[in-house]
Image (cartoon, rainbow, N blue to C red):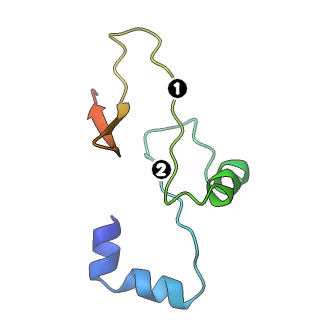
Amino acid sequence: VYLSLQEAGLLEEMSRRGVTSVFQFGVDNVLCHVADPTFVGFCSLRGADCGVKTIAKADPHEKVGVLASVGGKPHVVEYSD
């Protein structure tokens, strides 16, 4: 998404217009609080380039995404539909 925004010149345009943050979420996450001000504020105060909310799997076979740090960078290491 962000590469496309950059290639289209939209990140520069957004910056020019004073946009400082972008909120993105998985459309299949019905529990997501869109533009949750507490979470957005937390990320901003921490100086985070990005943020993600996660919860532990209910059991090892639960079909949910798994996030991990790989080489010091965040990655989705497992995802099952």
Residue tagged 2: 25
Q: Nearer the viewer, residue 56 or 80?
A: 56
Pinpoint residue 81: horizontal percent, then vertical percent: 28, 28
Residue tagged 1: 55
Residue at the image position 45 percent from the left and 88 percent from the top: 13
Q: Nearer the viewer, residue 81 or 61?
A: 61
Cβ atoms under marks 1 and 2 closer than 8 Å: no
Residue at the image position 49 percent from the left and 55 percent from the top: 50
Q: Is residue 33 above or below residue 15?
A: above
Quarter where residue 35 is shown: bottom right
Amino acid at circle 2: Phe
Is disc 2 surrounded by few (<14), some (14 to 19) or many (20+) residues within 10 Å? few
Mark 1 or 2, closer to the camera: 1
Amino acid at circle 1: Ile
Hey, which residue is sitting farthest front in the picture?
72
Pinpoint residue 27: horizontal percent, then vertical percent: 44, 46
Pinpoint residue 77: horizontal percent, then vertical percent: 27, 33
